[in-house]
Image (cartoon, rainbow, N blue to C red):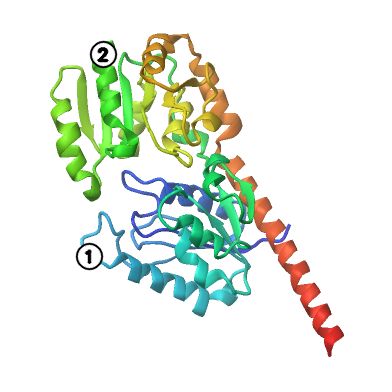
Amino acid sequence: MKKLRIAQIAPLVERVPPKKYGGTERVVYHLTEGLVERGHDVTLFASGDSLTTARLIAPIRESLRLGRKPHTPIMVTMMMLARVYEKMLHEFDIIHSHLEYQTLPYAYKAQVPTILTMHGRLDLGDSAAMLRSYPDMTYVSISDSQRYPVKDINWVKTIYHGYPSSCFEFNDKPGDYFLYLGRFSEEKKPQDAIMLARACHIPLKIAAKIDSADKGFFQEKIRPLLDHPLIDYVGEVDDTRKVELLKNAKALLNTIEWPEPFGLVMIEALACGTPVIVRGCGSAPEVITNGRTGFICNNRLDFIEAIHHVDLLSRKTCRKEFEQRFTRERMVNNYEELYYNTLQKSALTRGKICFNEELMT
């Protein structure tokens, strides 16, 4: 197959890959590296502190969240998109944007096809109306459930995220603690994880990020619950510490209460052999097989029962599920196939247009 000239456009919030918390940028990293390994000519548009074997083009030196210089996020993102679509378009066969809505006005009439992976939830504000304004773009979902709020646009494929198997160490002999890993925010319901741990008398380690928007929630709802002998808050962690926590946890206690579009933390846990106890919303039933790689819970009693029965699950089965469904190789295969199919369809469309124009002259 022809080697492609591919532009990958990443958010500027975190570097690629993130130093600590960050999902989308982590996915972009593994996709980019996988495409480079296959011989494609990849250009990554991301913050200047990003690490990549692709050609890096950076509108800012450091990522927005952890960088030392303040930037206006919307402005620097617009400058990056303008550079791609107005100055460098001729350099690419295909553009893959992870910036969602911001890309649409730039990509709408571009001669080079754009793939848009939607990483966030689509049920808030004007999200659905915005997407319906551009219904014929090439959209990728990261779970089937993510599409629910706006089914009537050109969804071409669902592609699950993936990691190299080597990123996570399998451990069949975990410790006695449960783990909450992610973000302190209302929709993630970390307070439920804490109260479950206290009710079931189980040790709970918490590794979580506090966004600026969630500081009030943390101070009011979470901080008062942390002063308990069963609860160990370790802060926001890097990749090394995250793997250590995941592989030694008896289970991941994922008490989310929102339509999670995917949830990288769930496949990170599976990669270590760690079962996932999760509320049955969003992508959870697609990622976790109830009674096999974890438990899907609908209420507090379900969570309590799952905590008491998690030792019945096979950690080897969890790891095998990861290897079969959520590897980087599988993710890259799916995107590579989509790139070729999109280019073939684009070429056929252009051919029809040229043919019709010839008939009219």
Instruction: Tell me, yes or no, if residue 117 can be seen here.
Output: yes
- Tell me which corner region of the image, top left, top right, bottom left or bottom right, holds residue 303: top left
10 Å neighbourhood of mark 1: few (<14), some, or many (≥20)?
few
53 and 15: which is toward the camera: 15
140 up-or-down from 72: above or below: above
What kind of residue is marked 2? Ala
Secondary-structure class at tag 1? loop
Residue type (three-letter) at the residue carrying disc 1: Pro
- Spot occupied by residue 179 in the image (x, y as percentages of width and height): 32, 25
Q: Position of residue 60 (x, y in %)?
A: 32, 67
Measured as percent of width and height from the top left, residue 318 is found at: 51, 22
Identify the residue under disc 2: 199
Q: Is residue 216 left or right of residue 96?
A: left
Q: Name the residue nearer the viewer: 1 or 359.
A: 359
Residue 173's spot in the image, x, y percent? 40, 14
Q: How many labels does the image show?
A: 2
Question: Dot 1 corresponds to which residue?
Answer: 70
- Crowd class of label 2 (few under 14; some 14 to 19; many from 20; radius 10 Å): few
| Residue drawn at x 52%, y 44% as measured from the top left | 146
List the single residue furthest toward the bottom. 361
**Residue plotted at (50% across, 36% down):** 283
**Location of the C terminus (image quadrant):** bottom right
**Left or right relative to 217: residue 149:** right
**282 lies above or below 358:** above
Determine which of the numbered discs, if any, sits on residue 247 in the image. none
Please name whichever residue, 137 or 48, is drawn nearer the observer in this view of the structure.
137
| Vertical comparison of 266 with 86: above or below | above
Q: Which of the two discs, 2 and 1, labels the residue nearer the N terminus?
A: 1
